[in-house]
Amino acid sequence: MKRIVAVSALLLIWTVVGCSSMKIQTRADPEADFSGFNSYSWLRHPQGADARVGPQVGMWIVGAIDEEMTSKGFHRRDPGESDFQVGYHAAVQGRMEVSNIDSYYGYGIPHSSPWMYYNVGSTQQQSAAHYYNEGVIVIDIVDARVNRLVWRGTAQAEVKGDVEPEQQQERIREAVRKILADFPPN
């Protein structure tokens, strides 16, 4: 019975981590006028991009942004002919999440990676550390008339390495869709 409880608790922890949600944030310049925005062009991609974000991922991000902009009624134009410009940044960074776990039930946490445990001063409580990679997508909107950043949206979520390319692409589409849901601001 104790073993079933221990395995159930571990599966619950893995399920929560496996279903970690995407964190979305958007910010708009309160003085910006978005009413005249009808067409967009792409900003040049900045130098020094994260090498872990390959060209395929970049193409997926650009495609997803183009799809969302088209669905919102914006038309893509050449630079110099648009009302606003769009740029993106993407990166992957290592993260650690620490959770305190009560050990009142008498079971421990296995020593296997990525979960480890250690005592934190009491035999009644342990901490578990989960190491993972977090992906970040940043979408910038620049008013082409004044060359000023007027809107920024970000998505952060755990990146899993064992996912098929089609699933990765769909996750990127979902992130872009959620980021741009609030663009243009009302």
Image (tube, grey):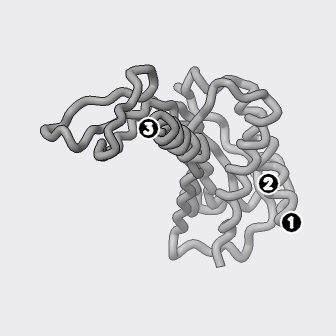
In the rendered structure, the answer to whether residue 151 lies left or right of residue 165 reads left
Residue 122 coordinates in the image, percent (x, y): 15, 40
Q: Which residue is mark 1?
A: 73
> What amino acid is labelled 1 in the image?
Gly
Look at the image and tell me whether residue 136 can be seen. Answer: no
Which residue does the numbered mark 2 point to in the structure image? Answer: 81
For image coordinates 82% across by 65% down, the residue present is 72
Along the viewing direction, whichever of 170 and 102 lies nearer the viewer: 102
Task: Identify the secondary structure beneath mark 3.
Answer: helix
Of the pair 135 and 42, the residue shown nearer to us = 135
**Nearest to viewer (mark 2 / mark 1):** 1
Q: CA distance from mark 2 to mark 3?
A: 68 Å
Dot 1: element: loop
At x 71%, y 42%, the residue is 172
Residue type at mark 3: give it: Lys
According to the picture, the residue beneath numbered tag 3 turns out to be 2
- Please report contact status of discs 1 and 3: CB closer than 8 Å, yes or no: no
User: Is 3 on the left or on the right of 47, as rendered?
Assistant: left
Callout in the foreground (2, 3): 3
